[in-house]
Image (cartoon, rainbow, N blue to C red):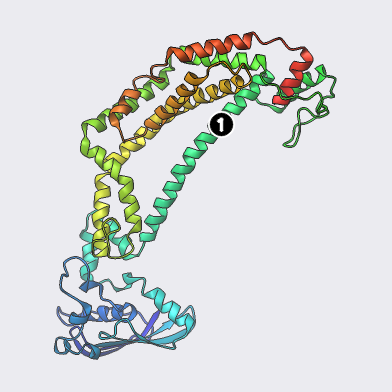
Amino acid sequence: MIQIESLLIEEFRGIRRLHLHFNKETYAICGPNGTGKSGVVDALEFALTGDISRLTGEGTDGITVKSHAPHVDKRNAPHKARVVLQAYLPKLGRSFTLERTVGTAKAPKLTPNDTDVMAAVSDLGKHPEFALTRREIIKYILATPNNRAKAVQALLRLEEIEKVRFSLNSIHNATTREATNCETALGESRRLLLQALGITELRKAAVLEAVNAYRAVISLGPLADLEATTSLKQGMSSATARKPKVVKQQASTDLTALIALLDVPLPEAIQENLSQVRKIFETLRASPNLLASLKRESFLRNGLSLIESGACPFCDAEWEQSLLRDHVQGKLDEAKQASSLKDELRMAAQPVEEHYRDIEARIASILGHADGLDSSLSRTALKKFAEDLKDRRAMLQSLNDIETSIRQTTTITGDRSRDVDGELSRLKDAVTALPELSKEDAARDQLTLC
């Protein structure tokens, strides 16, 4: 930081005139009460920052630096109260002189007044921790652990860390949700590929064996390797390659799988997760204050990150900045139990959400097959069912309507209408009625789809 060479104090606090020569050494200031020890520390802080932390903050109503920093005999002449600091900057290998009067506290005189020295002195002014008095040190020692952490954070100007932490946490949550969606889509694509190739695991050797079997049917040479740019229908002319409307075998398999998924009992693990989600919602319904805390937690965290001046970011009311931060942080502390409950809800809901996504993905596949069938076949109920599942998935972590959330956790798929079963049955009949393809056409279709 800096090495102090000398400090001249005139008409400042309880000191009429005092010239201390530190000569870049380390000194301790001692003496009886009321002899001006704290005044020396105040003078050093004032020289570097233009402020005196002991005269601001909680419990200092009506006290200002301009009226209380000058010696009692010079209250009406703040320009007479001055501090001159001479110090050495090891980083620059240079000395500087900084003079500041209480009357013009925000306009110090710096010599030499060049860019590098100005930047170094400005940086010093951002670190008030160098001017801690005995009283302030005791205050930090006696503070409760939670309040001590907040006070030290404020002292070291670490508010930006909380902002960054909050932003990173928001990014983490958003990317986690996106990653979950991507993993679901990837899993569904993997399932469809395995199904189309008739294999059980996605290994290069297994894929090549299945693909080359289809290629042999239409007299194409085998593929020796699989790379990112490899086309499975390599060598197939555009005249023979076609995009089939519906691959009968795949559509039949997808329909059978969806109907079975909807008809079989839920896995026990999913039932337990659904029950846990419902219990958490019931806990929130029984505790309106807990629910209110949970709803406003995100609001308060956003507000805390926006506190950059003495005005409240919520209502523009004037506050002392540190007191406002403490007030908002206190509200957040009250919401800790609710926040913990929210984490439990997210963990319990995740497997249920994945189950919903699986059903939704399978319905999307069926609707894709249906697009290649008779256009007169109704798909309205199936589409509505998919939308209902999406809404149910959203309600698993929604706090906007607790009663609805509780109702929708009674069953995993709700009351599936008969129209859905009817449409699935008619679609299955339509797929069954499709003509059987020759081995050659089936092989071409599979290679085209994969």
Which residue occupies 15% across, 70% down? 61
Which residue occupies 79% across, 16% down? 440
The part of the image, by quadrant, that contains residue 57 is bottom left
Quick check: 170 left or right of 231? left
Q: Which residue is mark 1?
A: 185
Q: Position of residue 172 (x, y in %)?
A: 46, 45
Few, some or many residues within 10 Å of mark 1 (<14, 14–19, 20+): some
Tell me if residue 3 comes above or below residue 424 in the rendering: below
Question: Can residue 180 be seen here?
Answer: yes
Mark 1 element type: helix
240 and 205: which is toward the camera? 240
Which residue occupies 41% across, 74% down? 123
82 and 430: which is toward the camera? 430
User: Where's the N terminus, which quadrant?
Assistant: bottom left
The part of the image, by quadrant, that contains residue 56 is bottom left
Quick check: 314 left or right of 98? left
Question: Can residue 264 be seen here?
Answer: no
User: Where's the C terminus, which quadrant?
Assistant: top right
